[in-house]
Amino acid sequence: MTTTDRRNARRQMKSAARLYAVQALFQMEQSDQPLDKVRVEFENHRFGARLEDGTEMAEGDTGLFRALLEEAVGDQARIDQMTDRALVETWPLGRIDPTLRALFRAAGAELLLGQTPPKVVISEFVDVARAFFPEGREAKFVNAVLDHMAREARPEAF
């Protein structure tokens, strides 16, 4: 495997971890399951799993996945406040689609972790929005909200 192939594989694993983090946060909110139970389920049954129809789930970056979940849960109030400030007054976080709410929490967590450039975080989570809402305008909405959140969380990067 070439260096470029390894980089691409690592990038794909990080992208998968972001998608899985959104799914896990959504599941935690909808089912009221604790972080540890959902984390173990994803790591043991979704990362790289082969479905009955032969589809193979992507392998995820376990370290990033865990960091996003832990930060999103541990700093949820701060992330939710950043999201609320980025939304228009008539659309508070509670009125937002639960999938988008999970996405904003995962993205907010990555912004607060500060290890990935904000523009990369925004781009990656806009792609996640497209995966969940391929026909809608949600990707543009996510881009605008995350841009605002990134400027608040990491003003030195702009």
Image (cartoon, grey):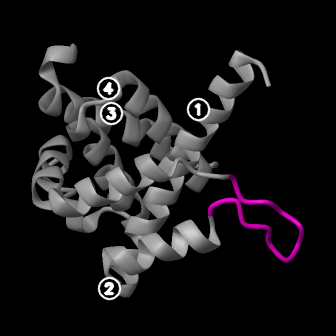
**10 Å crowding of disc 1: few (<14), some (14-19), many (20+):** some
- Where does residue 93 sit, x and y in percent of width and height? 21, 60
Q: Earlier in the sequence, mark 4 or mark 3?
A: 4
- Where does residue 101 sit, x and y in percent of width and height? 33, 60
Q: Extreme right residue here?
A: 54
List the residue tagged with mark 1.
11
**10 Å crowding of disc 4: few (<14), some (14-19), many (20+):** many
Image quarter where the C terminus lies is top left
Q: In this view of the protein, which residue sits in the foreground, 16 or 137?
A: 16
Question: What segment is highlighted magenta in the picture?
Answer: 47-58
Q: Quadrant of residue 47?
A: bottom right
Q: What residue type is disc 2 on?
A: Asp
Secondary structure state at the residue bearing disc 3: helix
Please say if the residues under marks 2 and 1 sit with CB atoms less than 8 Å apart: no
List the residue tagged with mark 3.
144
Q: Label 4 to label 3, Cα distance in Å? A: 13 Å
Mark closer to the observer (2, 1): 1
Q: Which mark is residue 32?
A: 2
Vertical relation: 81 (above or below) 11: below
Q: What residue type is disc 1 on?
A: Arg
Horizontal arrangement in the rendering, residue 152 relative to residue 53 (left or right)? left
Q: Label 2 to label 3, Cα distance in Å? A: 29 Å
Vertical relation: 28 (above or below) 105: below
Q: In this view of the protein, which residue sits in the foreground, 30 or 3?
A: 3
Q: What residue type is disc 3 on?
A: Ala
Q: Label 2 to label 1, Cα distance in Å? A: 31 Å
The residue lying at 36 percent from left, 60 percent from top is 102
Q: Label 4 to label 1, Cα distance in Å? A: 16 Å
Q: Label 2 to label 4, Cα distance in Å? A: 30 Å
